[in-house]
Image (cartoon, coloured by chain):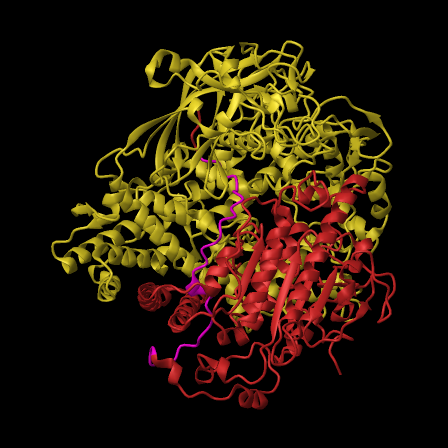
Amino acid sequence: MPSFKVNFSSTNDIGTGIASAAQAGTLRRTMMGPHIADRRTLSRRTFLRGAGVAMALPLLESMTPVFARAKQPGTPRRMLAICNNLGLLPDRFFPKNSGRDYELSPYLNELKSYRDDFTVLSGVSHPGVDGSHSSDVSFLTCAPHPGGGGFRNSISVDQFIAAKIGHLTRFQSLTLGVNASVGRRSLSWTDAGVLIPCENRASSVYRRLFLQGSEEEIERQVRKLQLGESIMDTLEQESKALTRRLSAADRDRLDQYTTAVREAERRLVMARAWERKPKPAAPVGMPFDPSNRNAFMQMTRLMYQMARLAFQTDSTRCVTLLMDGNNSPAIKVAGTKITDGYHNLSHHGMNKDKLTQLDAIDREQMKLLGELIRDLKSVEEAEGNLLKNTVVMYGSNFGDANKHTTTNMPVLVAGGRLKHGQHLAFDRTNNYPLPNLFVSIMQSMNLPVDKFATSTGTMQGLLPA
Amino acid sequence: MFFRTAFFVFALFAGASLWAKPRAVQSFLENHCLDCHDDDTQKGDLNLESLGFELGQAESFEKWLLAHDKVEAGEMPPKKKRLPKSDEVAAFLDPLAAALGQADRDRVARAGRASVRRLNRFEFENSLRERLHAPWLLVADMLPEDGTAHLFNKVGERLDVSHVQITKFYEVAEYALRAALNTVAHKSNTQKFYAREEGHMKSALRWKPNIQTAATRASIPLLGTTPQPEIIRGNQPMTVGPSNPEVREQEAVGFVSGTYTATTKYDFTRVRVPIDGRYKIRMKTYTFLAGPNGASGGNDHGLTGGHKAWWRPSRTVAFPGTRSEPITLYSVSRNGDSRWLAVYDSYPEPSVSECEVILKKNEIIRPDATRLIRTRPGWSGNANATREGVPGFALNWLELEGPLQDEWPPASFTAVAGDMPYKLEGGVKLVPEDAALDARKLLLDFMKRMYRRPVDDAEAEAYLAIFERSQALGRDFTDSIIAACATILCSSDFLYLDAEPGPLGQRQLASRLSFFLWNSPPDEAVAQTKRLAKPKRLRRQVDRMLDDPRAARFVDSFLDYWLDLRDILANAPDAILYPDYYLDDELTEASVFETRAFFTELIAKDLPARNVVDSDFIFANERLAKLYGLEPFEGIKLRKVALPKDSPRGGLMTQASVLRVTANGTTTSPVVRGAWVMERIMGLHIPPPPSGVEAITPDTRGATTIREQLDKHREVESCAGCHSKFDPVGFALESFDVSGGWRERYRSLGEEGDRVKGFGKNGHAFKFRLAKPIDCAGELEDERAFEDINQLKQLLLKDERAIARNLLHQFIVYATGAPVSFGDRKTVEAILDQCADKDYGVRSLIHALVQSELFLHK
């Protein structure tokens, strides 16, 4: 009887052990060690005015305050990006006519109470992004040909934003998933094109946001982080001998290593700074994680709540959520019997029974989105409400999952400082570049960005004059 | 002579200020190319008019190479233009080839063919397993997936590292070290678990109103083949217990159903796995035949009354089994993930089977009788049932022995802690005599063990500083040693496979060989072979390594990437269209094993490379034999089967695994399969599809076939240019469905076509119909026509050398981390020449590659 291991890739949905250290934000390390909170800082706005518009603006060492929240004028601006990687039935999602007086489609009718809070887009896609199911990895990165050989992903828009404002909050960003295949699927990618694993458990998100360790635990954690810093420092030093031996071309590879090590160290320093600062009080109790993966909708609802809580407590300003339908079994939807795995349903081949089930799933998606909009709206803030200060982007990498098309992606944008209550209909044959939406979103968050990936400008008709 | 020419050319070009475009090249361009590829037209996005002749730059080099290859292949200039004379062509190609070759040699001299690279996550895992003597470590899945280039996870340019990875590598290293030390806290012991005492088996005995009232999903208490209904009624205890060992030994619980976690499972949940490690599982099981005419419903747990049907199992009548049943064992973690462990045949005679497996802490064991029904809501029959009864599987007990250690203290403990004394106090704690002195010794020994190079004593200082820092921060000796050792495992010296341009040094060569054939670092035998590069010694080492069980890692990993076998679970068959494959884990499992066994055989017997296109044998077990329409036989074990002359099987492209990964579970596409086969098996370079073109997907309503849909597009010239290279191959493969079964007609979910009678694995009656017939004829680009897959294979076999060349290319990327460049082509042809008299034997190709400059130089 054979006893060797088969490398069947496991569908591992453990709540990932994202080290809190690695996620905690980028504090640029100052030269003198731990007493960074007292350092005098240069006003970010003063700096920006001088620098003009710049992409991937490098932050100067002396410019970044550690706990800048108190000093930061105005209400924080945030972004939540959601991808449902099996899409929506297009003819039931897209409205028939365009403009402000468009008629709500069957799906959008589920959101009719919030008609003035969102804009629906059609005729948009990421230029050059093809590649079937793997295209969700490019949903926020816009990196072309994700299915092709030699594909390399690039930074996702949430990480791009986090690199600019992540240091202002305890968590630079949160990468969430519903049934996301850990290590294989994620919306968030680093600037080196490396996947940031999804957190699939709402309770783990909750713990990270609110649960304070004891004094002793904190001290232990601080010591652990201090040791981590020494370790990273040693790794950097010790790589020098190897680097010296290498040819010029290979030195680039080792440079990447040193950069990674330095970045890890920076994040440890930042995490340590946060460690002693009390976490916010939890406005609600700990969520209960469903034990079965078929509770897809309930998990989605919980993740929406976690995102809202994270924003409400200003724990982070960037959240992504990947609903991995491919990795889901036959899911539960109230009132409808779902007989087949989500992915198999998406290949409906015009089968009536499958279409009926998909319709129920899609409508439930819309309802949950409605709940999210409602909840965000209900939280009052200094300037308006949470929705007004949070851009929510919901969409899919698939225009039509049945056909695996990545053009004509369904996208809906809600909240933030954008013009809403409209259907922006672009060319269904010759799509309008969706990366322009990302630029508009960033500009609406007061970020000085005029280009992202394959964008060609800002999105027409979305930014207020 | 060759070198002298090369030198001459080099001198020539070096003299002419870097790269000057040879005059002959320019005049050919003007006469034959610039009509279309000039500044104005730029046909196919290629502008040769303004293209600089900067061969030192990758982009320019690639374009000139493309021009060279297109002209050499006779594809350019296009046939309808004025064709150049052969001497004109030569006058263009020769100097261009010389310049390209020289540029390539310059690059290799400067930087080597391949770049320095990081270990991928499997190599990292294997390195820890080997060097820590911890073959039970399962850590690759804890690390982010690596990038691939040219199909493989072996190429430096894609083995990136970010802060996420560094953090993860550290976490994993810490985990592994702790696990290695922990082995000393757990002596092996044997635990026995009787099925009669397991919760899942007990809870499946009795009806649960409104939840479970069906005999097919229930369990039957059996004493041998005698059901014990009084136990079901609750009038008799579940077991006689220790009071009567003889009877207890015969007590069993029977099922007629495979595992489906929501409804039926027979996990041994009381198993306690104390630590990650090697364990022995022994199981006593047998098969039986439950009598027919069982019931669902009723209020006596199906013992009397209810709705009877011949295909439902009786709960009061059973017979000895009439056949064996394949049993797969999985481990299940607390969060519900399951991992394949082993598979065996259980026979009508109760017998004990034993296997050695790797288990992780706190996992439980799940047996699954994979051939049996897995009921899903709406089920109305059982494909396994006959009028004589319903086949079933009975479990007596499971025994778990371990963690197994070959020596004490365990080798993994010694690998980290040497011979240090320890105590067990809230984990394993090392007891130092002189902390600083002991730490220095441990760290130095550890570096020598882990690094694939000699270590200087002074190098330990930096890591000793980590140990000291950790101690200063209040952590104990053991934790501090772990921190320092984990740091060593994240250092660039451990994580990177380095080399300088030129011939590889002894240790680098040993590493390259070992990561090629074992996916792990070299053992003593190869590392200590003096002057390893000597042909005879290399040959001996390669043979030794290929014959070692660790070579299975090469086969698995190479096939996982070359043929996408790692995605085998991604395309589950559709429940309605393919109910006969849906939930058929037995088939999925066997498909992967088949391909591995096949490729292993090619290497072991040095069989000709052409076997990847067609072979007169395959490997099959009962399930595969049924799928392939071979002479039926019983059993899960793969055996080598000689194929009948007219069989469409043989070779890789008609294996179930390949046919599955190239389909999506619902439909097949000739475009996808054709391109896949031509690229992976025949080595054709296929450019990515133009963006913005919607893929044509088959319609499952049955009214039109994919061929009819595609024909419209193939008439468009711009599409046909590429598609005529691979679509035809895909058409021949249309004879195979999404799981690799033979078909004459497409299945449909529409109104057209004929109904088929039968029941799926899920117990649902077939709903699909057989619609339009398959047309699998086609014509290759060179106009050679074929009627079906067999004829197509014969056509492809005509170019054995091309088949071997492609396989060699794949080996080269996998082994060296770099694709075949222009300058490598001559060496590749030389390797092929060497292997020609062996009919390009697969093992011969490996030998010749290892002996070549491509392998021996960076």
Residue A121 found in image quarter: bottom right
**In the image, residue A245 above or below residue B546:** below
Magenta residues, start to end = A5-34
Q: Residue at x 42, y 30 (%)?
A: A3
Quadrant (top left/top right/bottom left/bottom right) for the C terminus of chain B: bottom left
Spot occupied by residue A101 in the image (x, y as percentages of width and height): 87, 70
Of the pair B715 and B690, the residue shown nearer to us = B690
User: How far across and down, in percent of the image, does residue A244 sit?
Assistant: 35, 67
User: In the image, A48: left or right of B728?
Assistant: left
Colour that chain B carries in the picture: yellow
| Residue situated in front as seen by the camera: A135 or A215 | A215
**Left or right position of B717 against B177:** right
Magenta stretch, main secondary structure, is loop
Residue closer to the observer: A303 or B701: A303
Q: Nearer the viewer, residue B572 or A288?
A: A288
Q: Is residue B698 left or right of residue B151?
A: right
Q: Is residue B702 above or below residue B461?
A: above
Task: Determine the residue positioned at 28% across, 55% down.
Answer: B482
The percent coordinates of residue A364 (x first, y second) are: 71, 52
| Camera sees residue B635 | no
**Residue B440 placed where, x, y %?**
18, 58
Check if residue A10 falls in the magenta segment: yes
User: Is residue B796 visible from the viewing direction of this image?
Assistant: yes
Colour of chain A as rendered: red
Magenta run includes residue A444: no
Single out the residue that lies furthest toward the left. B433
